[in-house]
Image (cartoon, rainbow, N blue to C red):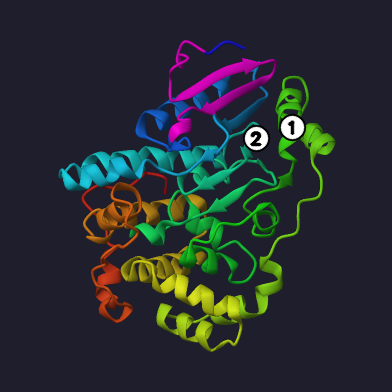
Amino acid sequence: MNATPDAPADSPVLLRREGRAGHVVLNRPRAINALNHPMVRIMSDALDAWERDDAVATVVLTGAGERGLCAGGDIRSIHDDVRAGRVAASAAFWHDEYLLNARIARFPKPYVAVMDGIVMGGGVGVSAHGGVRVVTERSRVAMPETGIGFVPDVGGTYLLTRTPGELGTHLALTGTPVGAGDALLCGLADHFVPSERLPEFTGALADTDAADAVREFAGAAPAGELAAHREWIDRCYAADSVEEIVDRLHASGDRHAKEAAETILAKSPTSLKVTLAALRRARALPTLEAVLEQEYRVSCAALASPDLPEGIRAQVVDKDRRPRWSPSELSGVTEADVARFFEPTGTGSLGLV
């Protein structure tokens, strides 16, 4: 049960063995365990080692602290990299992070992700591709990238295009967080375990198969909210442009739809249009790996966009919540502007396809 030599007690990722379970604990609780490059490397090395270790039957992912599994990538570092002209550092982080996301999805042993509390952005990437994804009544799962001038990544556009109807489009454009019931409805999670039973659940994995532990501890999740709104969500978000989506939302006559429209209009116009294009393209791509390759091109292109550092500044650095988007209106974003995000870049590819 001691930390392994590769992950000392002050490491941003703690590794330990309990019986037949290998535990990965994201360990930056003050930052809600936001991911940085060293954390990605530690996790990748642990998965490599535990895949080869016959004594490890299950991998368990949790987060330190009470606030959540992971609030996403360390976007303050990305802001600093862009401002200092070190964009290669952020591209390298995404390269290894996306490879880790693909690795998790194909991991040959049960990978149990405990998605308790806040699970956003990069936190979704290290959990929602796992084979056993557990949410609790405290879970708040989201891909909020359009609010910082970015685009859903870490395989998010793959996950969101596999949701029922247009739920994924709604979540991607608005960045709305969902609770346990809606995470299950959208296919972002598999099982509900009450937070008070998590210690018993994870402890049981030391000598119990993951499937048996789920049968013992999982139960019915609290009701979600999205199912009641499927009619206007599916109808409005089926439009071919962000402008038409917003128009349909405003014209729907439903208060919740109008609120969604206003939420969308506060996001980066460029990010909104690129996100919609990425989702539509991802639907036609056959595998997670192919989608991750597309996301890598889009993410690297975003490093040259003024909206990414500006969005991070407004939300995280200065916290004035008043980003100055460029362009400031949807009408100012052309098809050519969007197309540039999908062109090959000098950063290369992930080598997954």
Along the line of sight, the residue nearer the viewer: 176 or 20 = 176
- SS under mark 1: helix
Question: Which x, y percent locates residue 255?
Answer: 59, 80
Q: Is residue 5 magenta?
A: yes
Along the line of sight, the residue nearer the viewer: 36 or 313 = 313
Q: Residues within 10 Å of mark 2 (few under 14, many from 20)?
A: many
Amino acid type of the residue that numbered disc 2 sits on in the rendered structure: Val
Q: Which residue is mark 1?
A: 210
Residue 150 visible in the snapshot: no
| Quarter assignment of residue 160 | bottom right
Q: Is residue 114 left or right of residue 323?
A: right
Amino acid type of the residue that numbered disc 1 sits on in the rendered structure: Ala
Residue 56 visible in the snapshot: yes
Which residue shows up at 53% across the image and 54% down it? 142
Q: Is residue 189 magenta?
A: no
Residues marked 2 and 1 touching at CB (< 8 Å): yes
Q: What range is drawn magenta here?
A: 4-30
Which residue shows up at 39% across the image and 60% down it? 147
